[in-house]
Amino acid sequence: MESLEPSLKREPRIRMNNDSIVSGDDMDDENAMELQHKGNNNNVHTPKFKLREFQTKTISKIVETKGIHLVCAPTGSGKSSIIVNAAMEVHHENKETVVLVTALYIDHICQLFYRFEPELKQAPYQFVASETPDGQVQIVQDARDLVTAMKNGTRFFFATAKSANLLIKVAKAAKNNGFPTLVVNDEAHYSSQEDSAPMQLTRMVDAENGDRVIVATATPDGNVMKIPKIMRTLELGLDVAIKQNYCSDYSIVVPLIYHREDRSKNVAESKVKLPVAIRELMKGHDINAAAIFTVNGMWRDGGRRCIAYVESKQDAVKAEKALKGACKALAMSCWTRVITDEVKTSKRKEEYKQFATGPICDTKDGDNNSKPMERPMLRFLIPVKILDQCIDIPETDTIAIMHTPAADTGVVSAHRAIQRGGRSMRPKPDFRIAH
């Protein structure tokens, strides 16, 4: 399946909150724009990297307009750069602005903080939650200490969605002291319920007090779109992002799926010579079939690094074995790592680095004293119910869903599929597209 069916093609456009249509034809890296904005105190904030035109326009809208801003763009197209630069611009405009940054998990909030860190310089900040050394439990600070820190000059706070309820107290104290706030609600679709702390923070803003919110997401749901007075500041379509090389083009491969009740009880009786993967499906060996499809596809399309999603540790063991077997059948080498939520954050980072930078070929001794031969090496991360987001590995070129999603998972399943697919769609330096 191609990324855009002919009947679905439309003119690329970026919709800004004033309903103007901005052509994307010249929005490439060569034409990226510098952003320098002088605040009331004549300080100048200069981004560390050049920004694309749509990023510059979006940042300017957030700086100029108080209220709630929706920033909707595909994974990997530059939302984080918008968040960081807009927040720093607003802070430079008014040094009293209290910046409250929320994201779903520790990994994600750390990833955002690393983007902020070079910009913060000497500005004091507070991490509301951190992990214990084994990576299992959050250590949450006392709300009173956070409020005291804010009153003493701390202006940047970073919290997971789980601990963001403490930021509500900081926001209330800021309002009582006459300080404006800027709330960042990143990956908002995962915490869009009205009673969630990030959503409560979002709804607390008072534009007349100078407050702003950045609601960032690649997949906005109904709850996000129902936020009162939300401004659609940026809606960047995937078609535009691909056309302008903000994201990699992609293809979706959907293998044939047999319902279990339709599968032959005795595959050997089939008079038709079926491909191995189809025979595995008919036997009920879904993960084996998915592994064969994945490895064959990577061999055919030049893929080398794949994140293969599974739903349980038992499935992870099966997938690892099946992927190695499929690679061996095609005379390719294979590197695999299983990632669960029990793996420490520091260990995960080591595995991510090996996945991203490790070799994609190795040497096999030749037969009969012939010269050694190089053979491809496929690299697989196998996460168990994690890494749908909060992971930035641009080298990933293939995503494999190793199981068939349940039919009743509905919107949640769709969000997960889009987020997972985005892991492979960051721009690549060569001709390959994402799969």
Image: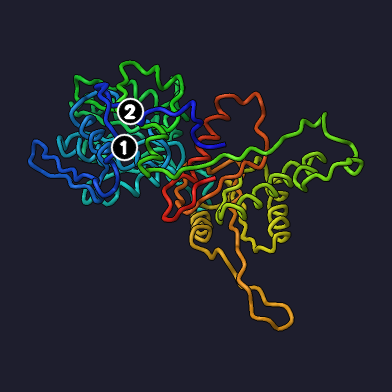
Q: SS for tag 2?
A: helix
Q: Quadrant of residue 360?
A: bottom right
Where residue 396 appears, x then y in whole percent?
50, 51
Among numbered discs 2 and 1, the one appearing first in the sequence: 1
Q: In which quarter of the image is the N terminus?
A: top right
Which element type, helix, strand or loop, lies under badge 1?
A: helix
Q: Give the residue type that dot 1 points to.
A: Leu
**Residue at 62 percent of width and 49 percent of height:** 297
> Is residue 120 visible to the viewer in this orientation of the structure?
no
Q: Which of 115 and 128 is in front in this view?
A: 115
* Figure check: 212 above or below 88: above
- Residue 323, percent from left and from top: 68, 53
Q: Is residue 112 left or right of residue 364?
A: left
In this view, the residue in front, 420 or 97, is 420
Q: Which residue is drawn at 50% across and 59% down?
A: 350
Q: Which residue is drawn at 56% across and 56% down?
A: 304
> Residue 65: x, y in percent?
20, 25
Closer to us: 312 or 424: 424
Residue located beneath label 1 in the image: 146
Residue type at tag 2: Lys
Mark 2–mark 1 Cα distance, whole angstroms, equals 9 Å
In-front residue for pair 296/210: 296
In the shown orientation, is residue 172 left or right of residue 343? left
Quarter of the image with the C terminus in it: top right
- Circles 2 and 1, Cβ within 8 Å, touching? The answer is yes
Q: Which residue is label 2 attached to?
A: 169
